[in-house]
Image: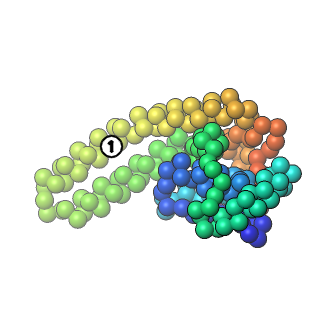
Amino acid sequence: MASGEPVRLTVSMSSWEGLARLAFFAEQFGYAYADVQLTGDNKFALFIVPDPGPQARQRAARNWERYPDARDGVSLPPVVPDAIEILKARMVVDSGSQYSDKVRMGLAVFTLTAFAAAIGFSLRADAVALVVVGVVWAALMALLPVLLVHGRRYRTRHAARLQAAGFTPVTDRSGRLRYGPPGGQLPGHGNPFAGGS
C-alpha cells in the first residue's frame, strides 16, 4: 500500500468480519474496497485500490499522523462497527454475484462427488463404509438446493442493507450485479488489475 498501487490480497478462508476489517483499515489509510472473489483454491482475493477522493486523502493524512506505527498491525484507528457491517454486506453480495446459482450447483455437485469418490476409493475393501459414504453423498445432494436458497436469501438480506444505506445496484463490466457507494461509482472501475481480477 505504501507504493500507492492497487493491492490484491489472497487470504485463506476467513470470516466476512475479518475481511471487512482488513478493508476498513485500508480505507483509513487512503484506499477503497474494490472487490472480493473466491479463488479456485478456496481462498479469497481481496482487491483494494487507491481512493483519489479529497476526503480519503485527508483521512489518510490524518491517520498516518495519528498512527505512524500502523504498519505493526496494532497501532490502528478504532473500528467503526457500522462501517464494518457495510463492508461485510458489500463482500457478501460481491462474492455471491461471482457465479450463477446453476454454476454454484455444478461446482458443489462436482466437488462433493469427487470427495465421495476419493473416500470410496480409499475404503474400497470395506462394503459397509462404501454404503455409508453413498448415503452421506446422497443426503448432501438432497441438501444442496436448500443451501442454495439459503445463500440467495442471505445475499438478498445484505443487498437490502446496502440499499438502505444509499448504495445503488450497478452492473460491472463483467456483467456482475454489485452495489456502488452513494453518489459514486464502483472503486477501481478502470480495472487497475488489468485482467487479474
Residue at horizontal 76 percent and vertical 66 percent from the top: 5
Q: Position of residue 2 (x, y in %)?
A: 74, 69
Q: Is residue 105 above or below residue 62?
A: above
Q: Considering the numbered disc 1 on the image, is that residue within a helix, a strand or a loop?
A: helix
Q: The C terminus is located in which quarter?
A: bottom right
Q: Is residue 1 above or below residue 98?
A: below
Task: Say left or right for 60 vs 79.
Answer: right
Q: Could you tell me if residue 150 is visible in this image?
A: yes
Label 1 crowd (10 A; few <14 / some 14-19 / many >=20):
some
Rendered location of residue 154, percent (x, y): 52, 35
Q: Residue furthest bottom?
A: 3
Q: Position of residue 8 (x, y in %)?
A: 65, 63
Considering the image in quadrants, where does the N terminus appear? bottom right
Question: Image point 49% across, 50% down: which residue?
Answer: 15
Q: Residue at x 60, y 41 (%)?
A: 81
Quarter location, residue 62 = bottom right
Q: Nearer the viewer, residue 151 or 91?
A: 91
Which residue in the rendered view is the most extreme toward the front?
Answer: 66
Picture coordinates of residue 169, whole percent (x, y):
72, 36
Q: Seen in the image, is 113 located left or right of residue 96? A: left
Which residue lies at the image location 67% right of the left edge and 44% below the top edge?
A: 176
Q: Count the numbered circles shown.
A: 1
Residue 50, quarter of the rendered image? bottom right
Whether residue 36 is visible to the viewer of this picture, yes or no, is: no
Mark 1, residue position: 140
Q: Horizontally, is 154 left or right of 61 in the view? A: left
Task: Name the colouring of the figure.
Answer: rainbow
